[in-house]
């Protein structure tokens, strides 16, 4: 049974005060941060003043914005630019979730505990953190929370987890 109703999917983030933003995902991540005692200096929500800049640069770096000019968060993986390079998909059976999340270590070029990355989750919520803290959040990330996007703060590469396909890929 899916609990997430998808109100945030397809939301245009140009107006962050729009009442249609779904807070369910944000609340769940906030709960994970508190329960897992995650250091907020190493993982936190990006300032609302930076949201538009991060999301726009993310979108224009990886997606076919000429064909899909409106930024929408549902099914973003189908709007990737054709010119990008892709890894083979990594699949999850959902029973191996921690092992699946640990595979991020193999996909990220600079894998240390000091580099900060962006994590964008369905609904348009943007976080930044180090890989160990991001993984700690994702270990607890419920499968009803749909897709997530992990990317370099230099926008050099992107890792997409697609809930529909139970898989993730890296693009650059």
Image (cartoon, rainbow, N blue to C red):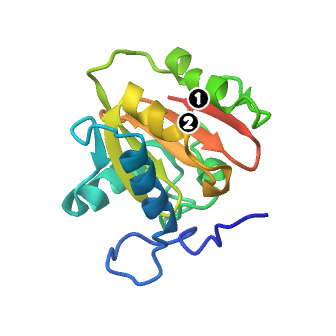
Q: Which residue is mark 1?
A: 101
Q: Residue at x 26, y 21 (%)?
A: 114
Q: Residue at x 70, y 23 (%)?
A: 88
- The dot on residue 5 is none
Mark 2 surroundings: few (<14), some (14-19) or many (≥20) residues within 10 A: some
Q: Is residue 128 or residue 73 the one in the foreground?
A: 128
Image coords of residue 40 (percent x, y): 25, 42
- Cα separation, mark 2 vs mark 1, equals 7 Å
Q: Is residue 53 or residue 111 the one in the foreground?
A: 111
Secondary structure beneath dot 2 equals: helix
The residue mark sitting in front, 2 or 1, is 2
Secondary structure beneath dot 1 equals: helix
Decide which of tag 2 and tag 1 comes sooner along the chain. 1
- The dot on residue 139 is 2
Is 145 situated left or right of 92 in this image?
Answer: left
Image coords of residue 62 (percent x, y): 48, 43
Q: Residue at x 55, y 62 (%)?
A: 68
Asked if one can make out residue 170 in the rendered structure from this viewpoint, the answer is: yes
Q: Is residue 152 or residue 106 the one in the foreground?
A: 106
Image coords of residue 28 (percent x, y): 49, 58
Mark 1 surroundings: few (<14), some (14-19) or many (≥20) residues within 10 A: some
- Figure label count: 2
Is 123 situated left or right of 132 in this image?
Answer: right
- Contact, mark 2 vs mark 1 (Cβ under 8 Å): yes
Viewport quadrant of the N terminus: bottom right
Q: Is residue 137 or residue 10 the one in the foreground?
A: 137
């Amino acid at each position: 049974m899916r609990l997430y109703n998808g109100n945030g999917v397809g939301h245009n983030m140009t107006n962050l005060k729009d009442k249609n933003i779904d807070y369910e995902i944000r609340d769940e991540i906030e709960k994970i941060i508190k329960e897992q005692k995650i250091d907020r200096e190493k993982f936190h929500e990006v300032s609302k003043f930076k949201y538009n800049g991060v999301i726009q640069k993310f979108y224009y770096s990886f997606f076919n914005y000429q064909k899909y000019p409106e930024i929408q968060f549902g099914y973003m993986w189908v709007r990737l630019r054709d010119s990008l390079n892709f890894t083979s998909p990594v699949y999850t059976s959902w029973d191996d979730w921690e092992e699946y999340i640990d595979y991020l270590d193999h996909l990220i070029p600079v894998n240390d505990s000091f580099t900060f990355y962006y994590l964008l989750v369905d609904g348009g919520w943007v976080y930044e953190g180090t890989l160990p803290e991001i993984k700690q959040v994702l270990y607890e990330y419920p499968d009803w929370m749909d897709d997530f996007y992990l990317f370099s703060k230099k926008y050099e590469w992107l890792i997409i987890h697609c809930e529909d396909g139970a898989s993730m890929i890296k693009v650059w």
